[in-house]
Image (cartoon, rainbow, N blue to C red):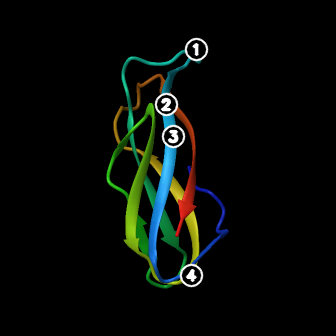
Amino acid sequence: MTGPHDHELANKITKTTVTAETYNIDDTVSRTKETYQVTLRRDNFFKTSYHTSDITANGGRVTRSFGTVKKGNYAVRVTIKSGDATSHTRIKGSGTINQ
């Protein structure tokens, strides 16, 4: 999933705080927990990106650092890292970008 390019960030340490859970196709909480990664992507010539380490979608609130980002306008992308094409689970959650 990719969000709009609406995060104008300064040249400073940037973090994300996220909460997410893994759900089955019938909308019940799954016993198998997926992992995901949050990416900040700047749509410039170099396609600058900053990534978090993997996060487990287990209902917990987690803060991860991107380190120091360069000043610019960024989109947020969330990528599922675990699971496979036949998986019937999905991740639902929310988060913030903080400087």
Residue 57 position, x and y percent, is: 43, 35
**Secondary structure of residue under mark 3:** strand
Q: Residue at x 51, y 40 (%)?
A: 19
Spatial CA span between label 4 and label 2: 30 Å
Looking at marks 1 and 2 on the same chain, the residue that comes earlier in the sequence is marked by 2
**Secondary structure of residue under mark 4:** strand
Mark 4 near mark 1, Cβ–Cβ under 8 Å?
A: no
- Which amino acid type is marked by label 1? Asp
Residue 49 position, x and y percent, is: 42, 70
Q: Say which of marks 3 and 4 sits in front.
A: 3
Mark 3 near mark 4, Cβ–Cβ under 8 Å?
A: no
Q: Which mark is residue 72?
A: 4
- The image shows residue 31, relative to residue 61, as above or below, that is above
- Which amino acid type is marked by label 3? Thr
- Which amino acid type is marked by label 2? Glu
Residue 68 position, x and y percent, is: 40, 76
Mark 4 near mark 2, Cβ–Cβ under 8 Å?
A: no
- Which amino acid type is marked by label 4? Gly
Residue at numbered disc 2: 21
Residue at numbered disc 3: 19
Residue at numbered disc 1: 26
